[in-house]
Amino acid sequence: MRNAFINELVALAEQYPHIALVVGDLGYSVVEPFADRFPERFINAGVAEQNMTGLAAGMASEGYHVFTYSIANFPTFRSAEQIRNDVDYQGLSVTVVAVGGGLAYGALGYSHHAIQDYALMRAMPNMLIAAPGDPLETRACLKYLVENPQPSYLRIGKAGEPVFHRTVPEIVPGGWLPISSGCDGRSDKVLLSTGATLGHAVALKQRSEYAEYAVYSMPLWGMRQKAAQGCRVANVQRIVTLEDHLHDGGFGSWLMESLATAPELRERLHAIALDPIVCGLVGSQKTLNAKGGLV
């Protein structure tokens, strides 16, 4: 997803001269194509993520669409106040890019576990979360965010994610993007994923107990997309959500909250998310996902 991100950003920057990239002294071997092609629109803010976010907000107030880029929790939790006050509250076109969502950097320990970031970012009323499930969804998210500038959070994997689409899909906020056969509106059982757990959803479908489930991805969602989910849930009998995030405050919780006024529909939902046990563990992404319950 990292390569898809930078390649698409460079292509979009060719079309849109207001696109800028600000990094927190990270991203080497990834961001060079942008830095070399557009040096006047590339800034290394150093190991100072709060300053990076404030700088991005200032540039956005002058007409730029700024992408801030760093690993996992650094551009989010370290910059939470600046995101809340400078970006989201002002409604500015800043896209916070976190590479290595979930447990992609699991070998570096809890400081690099991005497993509470949805909870933080979805609490921002103007924030749109972009959590692509594969490299082509990454391209689709970037195109949407550039064409619809707003405060946004782009959460991408580290590297090596499989491709599930043949072409770059058309996406809309809150939309269920079909992945597998059976996603034709007739299936009454759904595996609904956001982010890099799309691969887990596809793998689950291979099991006999999930063979009848249709697989969907939701790469764009946030506080403003909640209201429309009830109608979609009402059309199915069973939904299993998947995410590489803790249960509390995550994607499954978001969908359940959208059904607050329809308790009869909440019974149709089951959330597969990470157990808090992973907070104290160090290991590979695959190992930690398994320990946390993503199997």
Image (spheres, grey):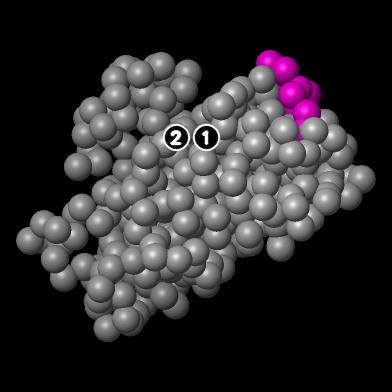
Identified at 28% across, 68% down, the residue is: 180
- Residue linked to disc 1: 99
What amino acid type is highlighted by mark number 1? Val
Whether tag 2 and tag 1 are in contact, CB under 8 A, the answer is yes
The one nearer the camera, 42 or 190, is: 42
Instruction: Say whether disc 2 or disc 1 marks the residue closer to the N-terminus.
Output: 1
Q: Is any atom of residue 122 visible in this view?
A: no
Residue 104 image point, x, y percent: 39, 31
Location of residue 87 with respect to 190 vertically, above or below: above
**Position of 39 compared to 257: left or right?**
right
Q: Which residues are magenta?
A: 42-53
SS at mark 2?
A: loop
Residue 67 image point, x, y percent: 70, 41
- Residue linked to disc 2: 158
Q: Which class describes the residues within 10 Å of circle 1: few (<14), some (14-19), or many (20+)?
A: many
Location of residue 266 with respect to 91 vertically, above or below: below
What amino acid type is highlighted by mark number 2? Lys
The one nearer the camera, 36 or 96, is: 36
